[in-house]
Amino acid sequence: MEHPQTTSNISPGTAVLFLHIPKTAGTTLHRIMEQEYDPFRIYTIEGGAIEWSIDHFKSLSERRRAALRVVKGHMSFGLHEFLPQRSTYITFLRDPVERCISAYYYSKDNPLNPFHQRIKREEIDILTFLDTARWNQNLQCKMVAGIDRRDFRPVDLMRRARQLGAPPPGPELDRWSNANTLEKAKENLLRYFSFVGVSERFSEGLILLKHVFGWKFSSYASYRKSRGRPKRESLDPAILAAIEQRNEFDRALYEFGKKIFVEAIDRAGVDLAREAAVLGRGAGGKRKSVVDFGSLVIRAAASRLASLS
């Protein structure tokens, strides 16, 4: 399997599009990128206003878009077509069963999540949640293949689905869970992505990103971990099997992406395990100082203000 995940194809001035698939440890990578790049040359698609943010990005002048070094957020593949400069994608994939479990418990435990109230009031279990929020199934394939978010997750349908007592959407909503979408997603990974990581080996993925893009960070802090979710092993095997069955195409894409990642590690010629251990010690040791934390907050806020202007 040939893949452009090397240092040789990243030229100066190349814009990086971080396709952040929900619940794949992406928030941590957002914070790292906000340290590595000029915050005023970053466009962030806001999680609470994704459709608006994408439309706003497309409406920017060509001069403004040409000045960007980073576009990041919950977007489907395809926004590179609106960048006049050379560009490349990066993403992390996650074991689809783990990703769905995290998506459910994040929605259940986060009072700000649109589905939180319904899950709590109706005691919705994980399989009912996946049938109600059907767009979560094979989500990685849909996003990497470039299926428009408004198609696989219509805004009006999502609003109805979170209302108390609303019936689940029909199976026609999930018509993109098929082999054609999977093959398109694989093709995009091979043709357009300079980095494909897996969340289960996140630290090693960060080391590989440092080598591919020349980033300078020496430690990192993890964000938005779902501390209240149970271990996979504690769930009923029948439930796990049902989640697996609902995400058969994401499973195939994950295994494909994992091979890309492993082959990239082999080609990198560096001791990624040793460097990742150093990163881990940096992340798990002393907490960041107030000054460092304040700087991070300021840079994150600046990038978002620049995105909204």
Image (tube, helix red, strand yellow):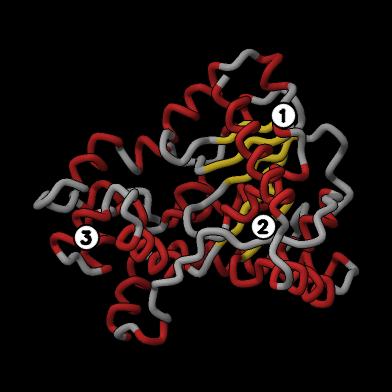
Q: Residue 218 in the image: state x and y as whole percent.
A: 82, 60
Element assignment for label 2: strand
193 horizontally vs 23: left or right: right
Q: Is the residue marked by circle 2 packed among few (<14), some (14-19), or many (20+) residues within 10 Å?
A: many
Type of the residue with mark 3: Ile
Point out the tag, 1 or 2, that comes first from the N-terminus. Answer: 1
Image: 46 above or below 283: above
Q: Is the residue marked by circle 3 packed among few (<14), some (14-19), or many (20+) residues within 10 Å?
A: many
Nearer to us: label 2 or label 3: 3
Q: Residue at x 33, y 62 (%)?
A: 109
Q: Quadrant of residue 192?
A: top right
Q: Quadrant of the N terminus?
A: bottom right
Nearer to us: label 1 or label 2: 1
Q: Residue at x 45, y 71 (%)?
A: 227
Check disc 2 and report the residue beneath it. Answer: 196
Check disc 1 and report the residue beneath it. Answer: 41
Q: Are marks 1 and 2 in contact (CB under 8 Å)?
A: no
Image mark count: 3
Image: 99 above or below 39: below
- The label on residue 119 is 3
Q: Residue 270 in the image: state x and y as whole percent.
A: 89, 69
Element assignment for label 1: helix
Image: 69 above or below 19: above
